[in-house]
Image: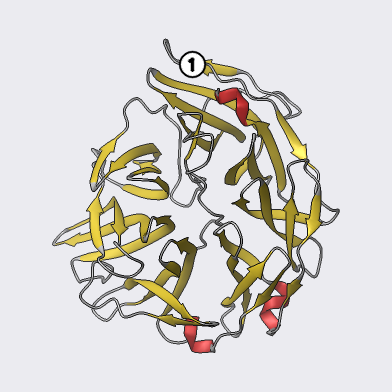
Amino acid sequence: MRSLPLRGSCACALAFGCAVALLGVAGCTAGDGSSASTSSRPGSAEVKLSWSVVRLPTGVQPLTLTAMGDRLLVGGQTTGTAPAPRMLLLDSAGTARQVPLTPHSGYAFEARWQSVASDGTRVIAIGAANGGAHFNSRWTTWSGTTAGIQELPQSFYAFGGWGAGDLVDVVVTSAGNAILGTWGGAKAGLDGAVWLSSGPVWTRQDPAGTALQSTPRLLVGPRSATPDAAGILVAGSALNLAPGSVVQHAALWRSTVLNAGWRRLDLPVPGRSSEAVSACCSGDQCFISGRVDGSLGMWDLSGDIATRLPDVPAVAVGDSDPLPDPLIIGGHLVQVAATHGHVVTLTRDGSGWSVSGGPVGVPQTAALVGAHLYVTVTHGSGTPATLWQADARAWH
């Protein structure tokens, strides 16, 4: 199975507006990673960011970031020989307190957070731990509030067994909650899959006859999901299997209300291979980040009309590279990414793009909370991830 990047919640609709921090420029970060220089195109607004490490309790590394009003929920895991899940709540002063967790099943005690979402009060999450004869992912589901989050044990066959695929994201919409992933297709490959909850039980829905069903000519490939008012927006790729030709192109799947009204939207791309990786929606507009022939691509989705954003700086993006959700900050589109082993943020305003460097490492997730942009950063195999912050008022 393909390993998917860890997911937090999309935080596009916030008081600051919408900003995107994107992949950037080589050699733009100071050696200690605490500050960065900025480059910009003529006519663009220059954004200068100063980064600092957020100190978490000793032995806890951050995995997911979820905005909860003026607080940040950090899904973490302990480091060492016996990893265990942790959930931390950071207030506006940066003080962290532990959120009590109540695991029940065996794999919950070592769960690694895959996705955490919230409506500002309630929290739902999915975790994964590898095990069993084939060392496949053993999924756990969680629910609660910042006063305490407990595991909701499921039947093994809810997410496992013959035909099992991956879980990609959990989303909280105005119409309810859903889990997005994949499952063995009735016609070909893997279908896109949706699980809906009834009380504590998650049940997989049948995709037959919907845009989420793969066919012998087109395979559905979800990469991430985000709430879209009462519906869901799934970012990924469609694999076209024409005679003598295999073409992967960036695509979206969009529902009207939770699991109803699914349709596929193909993103405009000039390249030979492309994929939508992450997305964020606010009102009637969504922004999508992905890759086109190994470079960063970005799109604006208004209604069901997608437009590729022009003049995106050339940034290499591999097949499995993470791209944090695009954000809107102070009326700017902001995308966080990595280039040459450093974090960079790319900002787009009405006149062009500017690029600001950041700490050493590769960003995994990003969230905007109050006056701060938070980013989790990994530093190579065997090294714990770290949490960084920058002052979001730089975009004003």
Q: Is residue 1 visible?
A: no
Percent x, y of residue 22: 49, 33
**Name of the residue lying farthest toward the left:** 243
Label 1 secondary element = loop
Count of numbered labels shown in the rendering: 1
Q: Nearer the viewer, residue 329 or 323?
A: 329
Say which residue appears at 59% left-offset and 56% top-offset: 120
For this rendering, which residue is in front, 224 or 87? 87
Q: Nearer the viewer, residue 362 or 174?
A: 174
Would you name the residue on which mark 1 appears? 45
Q: Is residue 179 above or below residue 343?
A: below
As displayed, is residue 106 above or below residue 61?
A: below
Q: Quadrant of residue 212?
A: bottom left
Tell me where residue 307 sits by quadrant. Answer: top left
Q: Residue at 53% across / 34% down in the picture?
A: 16
Q: Is residue 246 left or right of residue 296?
A: left
**Residue depicted at x 63% and y 64%:** 113
| Residue 291 higher or lower than 197, as above or below | above
From the viewer's perspective, tell me whether residue 127 is left or right of residue 264: right
Left or right: where does residue 89 sit relative to residue 21? right
**Residue, x 69% and y 45% (percent of image)?**
379
Using the rendered view, name the quadrant where residue 362 is placed: top right
The spot of residue 325 in percent (x, y) is 49, 46
Quadrant location of the C terminus in the rendered image:
top right
**Residue type, mark 1 in image:** Ala
**Residue closest to the far right:** 58
Residue 279 at x, y percent in the picture = 42, 48
Are there few (<14), some (14-19), or many (20+) residues within 10 Å of tag 1? some
Is residue 361 visible to the viewer in this orientation of the structure?
yes
Residue 328 pos. (x, y %): 48, 36
